[in-house]
Image (cartoon, rainbow, N blue to C red):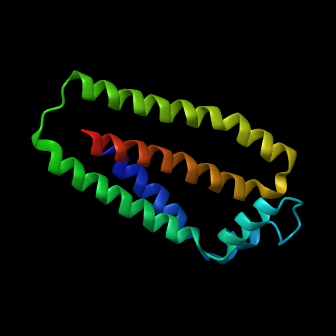
């Protein structure tokens, strides 16, 4: 249920802000940043492409749920539960580890705050989904 609820929230966030007029006004202006990566990522967001990230989150979550229900007939043993626990802990530690990096990037140049937060959310949630996906495939 956690995976479904959080995937719904992330995908809703990405899809609803895509091409939203007030949201795109908050993005930094084109080429105001001296970083080609952030300019490209901001252009990606401004073009409304975050909705595709949201759709991909929904599709990946559905695939994980289907695989989990297909393989649910098997009872998880201690080894499989241990692997799932470790994968969730690794995803959590990586997420916590990214927070100071995100803070440093935002404090060094506040113009790209929205782009940084969207990149952080995308990397963080895809990290969780990919972890669950491979864990579901493996078990």
Relative vertical location of residue 80 with respect to residue 64 in this rendering, above or below:
above
> Residue 128, how many percent across, how many down?
45, 44
Relative vertical location of residue 18 with respect to residue 134 in this rendering, above or below:
below
Rendered residue at 42%/33% (across/down): 88
Q: Is residue 91 left or right of residue 60?
A: right
Rendered residue at 81%/63% (across/down): 36
Which residue is nearer to you in this view: 110 or 63? 63
> Residue 51, how many percent across, how many down?
52, 71
Relative vertical location of residue 53 with respect to residue 90 in this rendering, above or below:
below
Q: Is residue 82 left or right of residue 34?
A: left
Rendered residue at 75%/54% (across/down): 113
Relative vertical location of residue 41 with respect to residue 109 in this rendering, above or below:
below
Rendered residue at 28%/40% (across/down): 138
Q: Residue furthest front?
A: 138
Q: Is residue 55 left or right of residue 124?
A: left
Total numbered labels placed on residues in the image = 0
> Residue 99, how many percent across, how many down?
66, 37
Which residue is nearer to you in this view: 19 or 122? 122
Q: Residue furthest left?
A: 73
Q: Quadrant of the C terminus?
A: top left
Which residue is nearer to you in this view: 2 or 58? 58
Answer with the quarter of the image where residue 60 lies: bottom left
């Amino acid at each position: 249920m956690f995976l479904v609820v959080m995937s719904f929230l992330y995908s809703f966030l990405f899809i609803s802000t895509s091409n939203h007029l007030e949201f795109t006004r908050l993005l930094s202006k084109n080429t105001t940043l001296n970083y080609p990566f952030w300019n490209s990522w901001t252009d990606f967001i401004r073009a409304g492409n975050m909705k595709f990230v949201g759709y991909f989150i929904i599709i990946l979550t559905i695939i994980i749920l289907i695989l989990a229900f297909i393989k649910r007939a098997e009872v998880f043993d201690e080894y499989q539960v241990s692997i799932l626990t470790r994968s969730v802990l690794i995803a959590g530690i990586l997420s916590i580890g990214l927070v100071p990096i995100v803070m440093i990037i935002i404090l060094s140049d506040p113009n790209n705050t929205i782009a940084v937060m969207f990149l952080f959310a995308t990397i963080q949630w895809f990290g969780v989904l990919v972890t669950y996906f491979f864990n579901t495939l493996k078990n």
